[in-house]
Image (cartoon, rainbow, N blue to C red):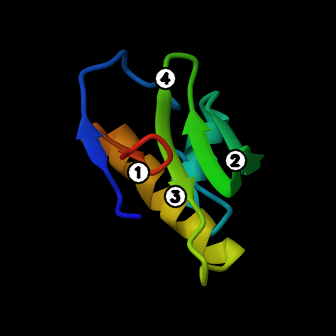
């Protein structure tokens, strides 16, 4: 299933004030969580394995795990999708795309 980036106007995402120094290999996810965002990874019926990033206003990224994709690869893609949503106003939705 191909990624479906969507650009929409929305309420701004809360950002951390000051310099942020990530401690993980997923800096965009880490900053997003520190600023109040939510990440869910697991089963959302009928899909077996998904990763979703959302804030209090909307879903920023929704990814489905590919058949040969490792957990680490999925989380790396989620980090990239969070970066695209937060810094480039491009949402990724692989769950609801047709």
Q: Is residue 39 left or right of residue 7?
A: right
Q: Do we see residue 73 in this rendering?
A: yes
Q: Quadrant of the N terminus?
A: bottom left
Query: Mark 2 or mark 1, which is nearer the start of the sequence?
Result: 2
Query: In the image as oriented, which residue stretches furthest toward the right?
Result: 42
Instruction: Using the rendered view, name the quadrant where residue 90 is placed.
Output: top left
Read off the residue under disc 4.
58
Query: In the image as oriented, which residue stretches furthest toward the bottom?
Result: 68
Q: Secondary structure at mark 4?
A: loop
Q: Secondary structure at mark 2?
A: loop
Instruction: Using the rendered view, name the quadrant where residue 86 is placed.
Output: top left
Q: From mark 1 to mark 4, how far is it between C-alphas?
A: 15 Å
* Residue ID at (35%, 58%): 3
Q: From mark 4 to mark 3, how far is it between C-alphas?
A: 17 Å
Foreground of the two, 85 or 48? 48
Q: Nearer the viewer, mark 1 or mark 4?
A: 4
* Residue 11 vertical placement versus 70 (above, below): above
Q: Nearer the viewer, mark 4 or mark 3?
A: 4
Q: From mark 4 to mark 2, how far is it between C-alphas?
A: 21 Å
Read off the residue under disc 1.
83
Name the disc covering residue 79, or none.
3
Mark 3 Cα-neighbour bin, 10 Å: few <14, some 14–19, many ≥20: many
Q: Is residue 23 left or right of residue 17?
A: right
Read off the residue under disc 2.
46
* Residue ID at (34%, 49%): 84
Query: Mark 4 or mark 1, which is nearer the start of the sequence?
Result: 4
Query: Mark 3 or mark 4, which is nearer the start of the sequence?
Result: 4
Horizontal and vertical percent for residue 12? 37, 20
Q: From mark 1 to mark 3, how far is it between C-alphas?
A: 6 Å
Q: Secondary structure at mark 1?
A: helix
């Amino acid at each position: 299933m191909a990624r479906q980036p969507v650009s929409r106007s929305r309420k701004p995402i809360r950002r951390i004030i000051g310099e942020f120094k990530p401690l993980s290999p997923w800096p965009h996810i880490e900053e997003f969580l520190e600023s109040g965002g939510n990440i869910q990874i697991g089963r959302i019926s009928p899909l077996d394995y998904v990763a979703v990033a959302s804030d209090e206003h909307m879903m920023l990224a929704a990814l489905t795990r590919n058949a040969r994709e490792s957990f680490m690869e999925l989380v790396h893609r989620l980090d990239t999708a969070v970066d695209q949503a937060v810094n480039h106003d491009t949402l990724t939705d692989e769950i609801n795309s047709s």
